[in-house]
Image (cartoon, helix red, strand yellow):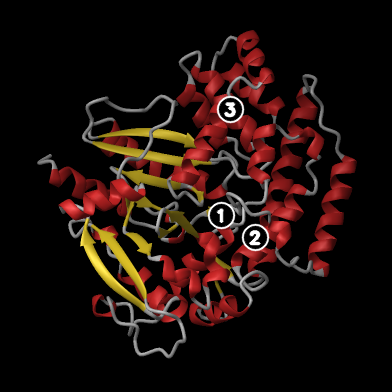
Amino acid sequence: MEMEWRVESLSLNIDSFRPVPMSPSISANKKAFKHKKEKSTPSNTRMTSQNKKQGMKEQRQDMKEKEHMVHDIIGGAAETDSCCGSQSGDTTPIQEIDDMINDPITSSPAGRIAEARTVHTAHTSPANTSPAMDKQAAAKGWKIAAFLLAILVIGSFWYTPFATPAALGDSAGIATNDPVVQLIVLTDKSCEQCDPSPVLAAIQTQVFPSVEVEEIGYSTSKGKKLAEKYGIQVLPAFLFDEKVAETENYEKVQQGLIQREDKYLLHPASIGGGKHLNPLKGTNPFFGKKEAPVTIIEFSDFQCPFCRRFFEETYPKLKEEYIKTGKVKFYFRDFPLPIHPDAQKAAEAARCAGDQKKFWSMHDEIFKNQDAISVDYLQQYAEGIGLDMAAFSACLNSGAYEKEVQQDVDEGNDMGVAGTPAFFVNGIIIPGALPFEEFKKIIDGELAKQGE
């Protein structure tokens, strides 16, 4: 899974958890970046040609150092295919699960990510951040539990004896003093990505072994009533009864549960897949034909390296085979991460270009030049695509689209987006910059359903 993860919470400040110790290597990295910042002074004035070239070279080097630093912090020498995301190293997912149940903060990826974010935001002055970025960077503790539960799901794939449909309703004989917890699983048999077995296996074997499961189809009358009553938007959905609050592990994962009347709903970000019943398209213009039978919604960050990978490797193929042929319409939504200081303004810049019917042109220019997207460079790209510079500068400098970008972030959180890039293909969730073949499989399946 190729994603860039963010650590947030809806209600609980991360400072209420035990602090994550900072290693000497991290401290050294912080000093190095502080020294680097003191040596370079960004200018808001128009740069000379020589300064522009030098500035771009330094920004590219700085970006590479930042990415290496994050990989060192959260993975060390371990092989990784995500930035601030899941790791693969010497320990198995099952071992990580055991560690996290016993010490869910310092041993979880979320704990390491929180540490990484501290380092990255240390060289961005709080006085210079926008209210939207402040809101994004605010500690939001439910994501820590969401990450924990997401790793449990990954672990369940390794723990194959329990990752089968036979595991439904079977606690595998694990001894527990927990009360019996009633769990309703709402799913859709026609949706391949909605199989609840892996998540359920993790719940039963590692978190709440006393659950008794009732599986209900979303398309049934009972299923639709449950979805409406409890505000369910993502399948599969997991609804626990009130007894879950009396279990041994409840306090460790409660921020990954959303209380809805007399039930507790597992947060969609903990599932890592499935299908959204009503994905929101946002306010950016779409690319393609309005009547296209398949809709793709991307949540992205202009400074995210895996978003650029999608742009370079997968997006061109989607455009040629599906978008230009009228089969797909493509929406782009903003999800700038706090660890990327230039992502917010880049998102605003694309929207300002959209005022002059050049949203997609600016979108392409920013990703092509991802290593240099400070405001000075954004001005250059705007001029290069032929924008009215007075209007563009006024829009960008005034923060005219700051609230709209934040609205995308808020709605993304509500839809279960936990990192970038994230996609919804007719509602089916694709979490990460997967190869074109994976998109093709899902798109062709959706077209077949509609007789295309």
Please indicate whether residue 345 sits to the left or right of residue 436 in the image.
right
As measured in the structure, the alpha-carbon distance from the residue carrying label 2 to the one carrying label 3 is 26 Å
- Chain-order first, disc 1 or disc 2: 1
- Chain-order first, disc 1 or disc 3: 1
Q: Is residue 296 above or below residue 240?
A: above
**Residue bearing the label numbered 2:** 113
Amino acid residing under circle 1: Trp
As measured in the structure, the alpha-carbon distance from the residue carrying label 1 to the one carrying label 3 is 22 Å
- Could you say where residue 112 lies in the image, as x and y percent from the top left? 66, 65
Identify the residue at image location x=34%, y=87%: 172
Please indicate whether residue 445 sits to the left or right of residue 211 in the image.
left
Q: Residues within 10 Å of mark 1 (few under 14, many from 20)?
A: many
**Residue bearing the label numbered 3:** 403
Q: Is residue 276 visible from the viewing direction of this image?
A: no
Q: Is residue 72 above or below residue 322?
A: below
- Could you say where residue 403 lies in the image, as x and y percent from the top left? 58, 27
Q: Is residue 70 above or below residue 39?
A: below
**Residue bearing the label numbered 1:** 5
Amino acid residing under circle 3: Lys
Q: Is residue 131 above or below residue 264?
A: above
Quadrant location, the N terminus: bottom left
Nearer to me, 9 or 182: 182
Quadrant location, the C terminus: top left
Q: Is residue 189 visible from the viewing direction of this image?
A: yes
Disc 1 and disc 3 in contact, CB within 8 angstroms: no
Amino acid residing under circle 2: Ile
Q: Dot 3 lies on which element?
A: helix
Examine the image and state in which quarter residue 383 appears.
top right
Nearest to viewer (mark 1 / mark 3): 3
Nearest to viewer (mark 2 / mark 3): 3
Numbered label attached to residue 393: none
